[in-house]
Image (cartoon, rainbow, N blue to C red):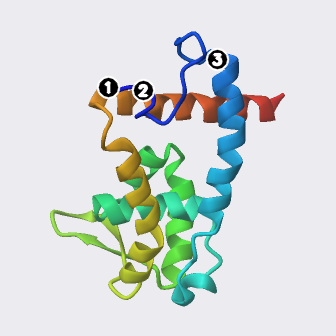
Amino acid sequence: MSTKDRGHKANRDGTEPGVDEAIRALLLLMPRMVGRAKRIRVPEEIQSLALAPRHLSLLSYLLFDGPMTVKDLAARLEVAPTTVSLMVGELSRKGILERREDESDRRRRIVSITDGKRPSIDSWLARGARAWRQALNPLTPEQRHMFVQTLRAYEAAMADDEDD
């Protein structure tokens, strides 16, 4: 696959862009990506529920990976179980999530999206999932891993800057 096929241009001398050129391209691209993500229409039936970005990640895991425990959700979200428990309680009161006993261990609770809200949540998240699938599908597993790790490193560096 040529560099042209990948959506970026080689320098005049045929070399790949340097770090500064890549940064410039990303600084122009990121606001457009965020703007498009913000314009994804929230379905009417869940607009009034005042869902925040932290809810989006939790709902994404439940939608794509199925029901799971608070402990499993906390591990995936990389937050404390008490944080997830509070979010689950909030979303349960709004009728978005339900908690039920685990049939194999009655001490555990399994969290899932309610059947009534699943279609709305699915339609809300589907556009982004389709776009990511289209962008990531042509990449090798190693390239996908590097892409995800690069985004994580960027997010961590941004968080470090907030702490200063």
Q: Secondary structure at mark 1?
A: helix
Q: Which residue is mark 2?
A: 146
Q: Which residue is mark 3?
A: 19
Q: Which residue corresponds to the image point at 52% horizontal and 72% vertical from the top-left?
A: 89
Spot the residue most to the right. Answer: 164
Contact between marks 1 and 2 (CB within 8 A): the answer is yes
* Mark 3 burial class by Cα count in 10 Å: few <14, some 14-19, many 20+: few
Q: Which residue corresponds to the image point at 58% horizontal and 76% vertical from the top-left?
A: 41
Q: Which residue corresponds to the image point at 43% horizontal and 56% vertical from the top-left?
A: 131
Q: Which residue is mark 1?
A: 142
Q: Secondary structure at mark 2?
A: helix
Return the x and y of residue 114 as percentages of the image width and height.
36, 81
Spot the residue most to the left. Answer: 104
Q: Nearer the viewer, residue 83 or 141?
A: 141
Where on the picture, by quarter, is residue 39? bottom right
Q: CA distance from mark 1 to mark 2?
A: 6 Å
* Amino acid at the residue labelled 1: Glu
Q: Earlier in the sequence, mark 3 or mark 2?
A: 3
Q: CA distance from mark 3 to mark 1?
A: 20 Å
Q: Nearer the viewer, mark 3 or mark 1?
A: 3
Return the x and y of residue 46 as percentages of the image width and height.
55, 84
